[in-house]
Amino acid sequence: LAQTTRLYSEEDLVVILTSSTIKQSLLNSSTAWLVQFYSSWCGHCIQYSPTWKALARDVQDWEQAIRIGVLDCAQENNFDICKDFGVHFYPTFRYFKAHNPAFDVGQTNRGADRELQTVRQLMVNFLQNHTKQDWPASCPALEPSSSENILSLIGQKSDQYTAIIVENEDSYIGREVILDLMTYQGLTVKRALSSDKRLIEKLGINSFPSAYLLHPNGTHDILDVQKRLRFFFSSFLKLLPGVHRKQNGSGAAQEPLIKGPQDPGISEAWKDFEKSKVYMADLESGLHYLLRVELATHQTLVGEELKTFKVFVTVVAKSVLFNSLSQLFPGRHSVVKLLETLLEWLISLPLEKIPYDAILDLVNNKMRISGMFLSNQLQWVGCQGSRVGLRGYPCSLWTLFHVLTVQAARQPDALANTGLEENPKAVLQTMRMYIVSFFGCQECGKHFEEMAAESLSQVKSLDQAVLWLWRKHNQVNGRLAGTMSEDPHFPKTQWPSPDLCPTCHEEQDGIHVWNEDKVLAFLKQHYGAANISPKHLH
Ligand code: FAD
């Protein structure tokens, strides 16, 4: 059940424990636990909460081995349980082993400091302290593999990849990558030590850490990542063709529920595309869906809805129109003409309400305005899913708004004379209004509204608007990773992945950090007009 406390919500990817759930959660648990007993009035706890949230995000993929929990000892109904666990100071961190058959107050493990990296390493140590008997069922082996074991796999065909992280004994990267990939199928990750001379000679590795990849077809090579950091190794491996998240996360091999691009039963022909490009076909299909399907559920547009629709058409039309003047317009003249006509029509009609059918008439060009046309076929390219029902429209809507924030930042005059020109948040506010009023997924709208209410007011420039949307989209990606919304062939990752933008990623004290200047430059290039491909347009 969704629970919220003053410091944490389930959005933070921590399990919020209470007096009525904690014992039951820890008893005979299939996973180990790290629980923070805190007090919502304690200053240290408040200051520490961002680190704890970052830790939970960082080890999100480990949750079938070890889970992160919190319990607020300041809540009246938790007073007794905190006494039972002997918690005297806040915050108190306790580790609990998996498969514990009886009540246990847990092990306090302070470590040298409470830095994220130290805690993460303590989590690995704690997992390794399990015996064969109480080893968490889904947790892969973390011990180094022997040269015999690895050498016996070389040159063998297999139904999956094997990645070997070769590193010094005190390095944690191998174990962290093993845990990062534990919910993925199509790949096994092993750890080997640099002291294993026979192995490193055979593999021809002379700097550490390095990763070596055995391909299913029996070939093998060193994994070529731009930076030899945990995040780069993990991201590269997650994106290998045929590697995807297990559907129920149970660890058991299973028949894929969702057909992939290469699967023979797929109903539509697969269209090749490059993930480094944006496709006009997605933007046009999104507009078609928005105007002819999503809007169609509203018989009459009136009041706030009508205002929202007018602003939305203004922003889209002006952004694309401006581009046409400056020779940057990536779209087709027929669609520009449609948007332009729609906008003029909306402005010229000072009506209090507009029946949807009138909009549809115009969009379907019943007025026979020449040269104006929006295809009524869905043609997903960069947004195609591995089966119907995945990706498609929501993907195109994100794409459209990223393009619009970038256009606004690259062409600040695009919204001149619309009343929106002085406002760096204009595109984001339009998106917010559209999502709340029209986006068919109400839950999504609710979440987006919460994010906007929390931080949209901090956006002070057009560049910050581009970055805000990128950050929030990644927040949604983080929340949806591994859920039913995820297309297993397009795993939700923190975007852009290192293969798309290596310089966007850095590491500080063992923690992944973004270089936001590089991210901004990348977003402006990726969602810029010159990167929008006309391929596969009808
Ligand atoms: P999408 O997340 O749709 O992304 C589309 C493309 O954008 C990606 O392929 C990638 O090229 C690029 N991209 C990815 N991340 C970023 C980023 N951070 N910055 C810039 N570009 C990026 N679904 C739910 O189940 N629950 C929700 O609460 C929910 N909320 C949503 C809120 C909004 C406003 C929208 C538009 C959609 C929401 N969805 C939600 C749908 C969900 O986010 C995805 O759109 C959908 O699952 C399809 O995912 P996808 O794999 O096509 O990638």
Image: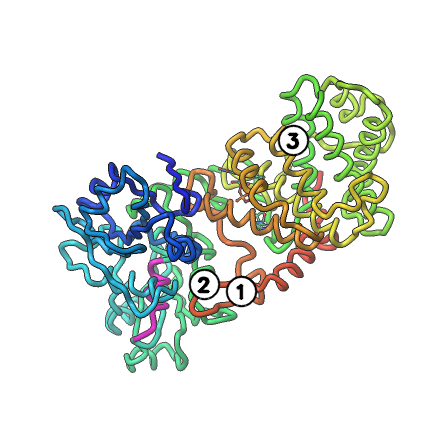
Provide the secondary structure element on which disc 3 rests: helix
Could you tell me which residue is drawn at 84 percent across and 28 percent down?
347
Question: What's the magenta region?
Answer: 170-179
Could you tell me which residue is drawn at 67 percent across and 61 percent down?
521
Between the residue at mark 2 and the residue at mark 1, the CA separation in whole angstroms equals 8 Å
Front position in the image: 232 or 331: 232
Is 482 drawn above or below residue 359 in the view shown? below
Q: Nearer the viewer, mark 3 or mark 1?
A: 1
Is 65 drawn above or below residue 439 in the view shown? below
Q: On residue 231, which mark appears?
A: 2
The residue wearing badge 3 is 289
Front position in the image: 203 or 229: 229
Q: Looking at the image, is mark 2 or mark 3 earlier in the sequence?
A: 2
Provide the secondary structure element on which disc 2 rests: helix
Kind of residue at badge 1? His
Q: On residue 505, which mark appears?
A: 1
State which quadrant residue 93 falls in: bottom left
x, y (%) of residue 36? Answer: 31, 52
